[in-house]
Amino acid sequence: MASQSEAQPSADRVSRTRVLWGIRIASKLGGIAICAAVAWFFKRYWGLGVFLQVATVSIVPLFLLGCAEWAAGRERKPYSGLLALLALASFVMNLMVLGSIFDINSSEHALLAWGAFATAVAYRYGLRWLLAIGLLLLIAHGALTWMPKYWFFAAIGAAGIAMMVILKRIRGRRAQKGVLP
Amino acid sequence: MRCASVLPAAVIVLISNAFVLVHVWKNRAGPVETDITLTERELPRDYIPNGEDSVMLNLRWMDPPWTAYGYAYNSGGSGERPQFVGLWLDQKTLQELGFDTSIAPSDKKAFEFYQRQRPSVRSAFVALEYEGPAWRKHLEQADRESLEHAGLSQSNMQPHSDESDTHLVAVDAATDAERLRKRHPDRNSVIIVPGLAVEWFLPPDYRLSRPALLSGLVQAIPASIHVPRPFSDAFRRLPGDPRNAKYRVHLRYGTSFEPWIVGVEFPPPSR
């Protein structure tokens, strides 16, 4: 009986962890779906006048950033995280749309802007996954700028693996200390 | 991990947008690099998926037909093997672009050497000539070919079509755009664009009597050109299949070799 009662909380904890991960994965997938919707929105209303188009694509990331700030002020972290992701997606679309309507030759420096933005937003709202995205974008920019192009994918792969190992170690240490479930 | 302000992120957005707009202004406010009028042959309208408002035109060019892509075509149906395959880019230009051409194509090690060379694609500035000597040479060649094949009933050759073929031919390449412009000074018929040049080794086969080192243009940048309002409205109003529309596009390239459309003309409908 004693061993059963000891085992019970552990099983609850495992199932709670699974549910938490399920919610996290579902919310990330939802975030990606909303980002895709934002991208399609920009593409669908391409036929606006140039001034209106430039104004729209420039204001949307700032507006979403404001919304994220508003949500964070009300202690609604899941919403602020989602809005931060949307702000990043709309900033990516912002530069892509400008590049397309003005026929600008593509440049790797866009990765620097996106990476810096993602990193700044990640630090603001304490979002580790957004920090990972930002760092990957910055690494990609460095690789494209300083390395021959054919090393690019190798560098990205190595950086991704290194980041996964580091995150796993941090998670392991925190789990040992009882910080994480 | 939280920091005090959201300001850095907002500043990044503002600086990035300002940077892009200043770049566009500098491209268009400086001296015009190229001022040219092209037709629907060189700038066919992009396929438009349902529900999208954008109007884009794709830049179409051809490599000189007497080089890489044209070599099989040039050999024709006469059964003769060409003794010489012309190079679009000579050995000196290929070296200037960064290709290693230290081993002659006739060398035994050439095949392995050129197979292993990385990257096989290099960034370069490319000169695209509109209705110039290269295009006329192509026409003469195509006419000669069609005469040769006139008697062959089962010929697979496509008839030459002056109506649909692009008249824009890639004629030269260099790493320095200014040097390339000096070699092709006519700003109304030669476009200088950033692009990707490729070289490859071709071993002898039934069409080619000796090995050759070939080169070509694989991509001109930007590959498609956005049509802004009010010109895009005229495209949207076109009756019938938009792919059959006839038009002339007045195009300019600025100091950053980026194009913009300054006019579109549609011929009056024929009765």
Image (cartoon, coloured by chain):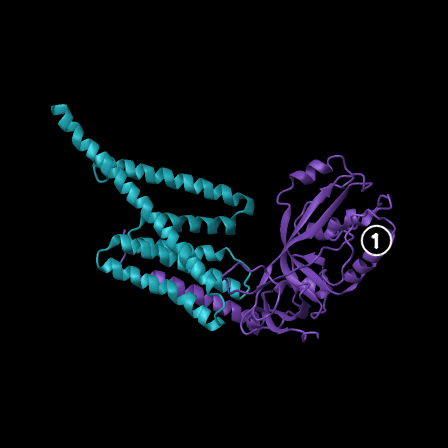
**Residue beneath label 1, please?**
B145
Q: Position of residue B203 (x, y in %)?
A: 75, 39
Q: Is residue A133 above or below residue A93?
A: above
Q: Secondary structure at mark 1?
A: helix
Asked whether, in this view, residue B129 is left or right of residue A135, the answer is right
At 86% from the left and 43% from the top, the residue drawn is: B79
Q: Position of residue A173 (x, y in %)?
A: 27, 36
Quick one: quadrant of the N terminus of chain A?
top left
At 64% from the left and 45% from the top, the residue drawn is: B120
The image quarter in which residue B15 lies: bottom left
Q: For the image shown, how many numbered marks are present on the structure?
A: 1
Which colour denotes chain A? cyan
Q: Position of residue B108 (x, y in %)?
A: 76, 34
The image quarter in which residue A79 lies: bottom left
- Pointer 1 chain: B
**Chain depicted in purple:** B
The answer to whether residue B184 shows anywhere in this view is yes
The image quarter in which residue A58 lies: bottom left
Q: Is residue A151 above or below residue B174?
A: above
Asked whether, in this view, residue B265 is left or right of residue A32, the answer is right
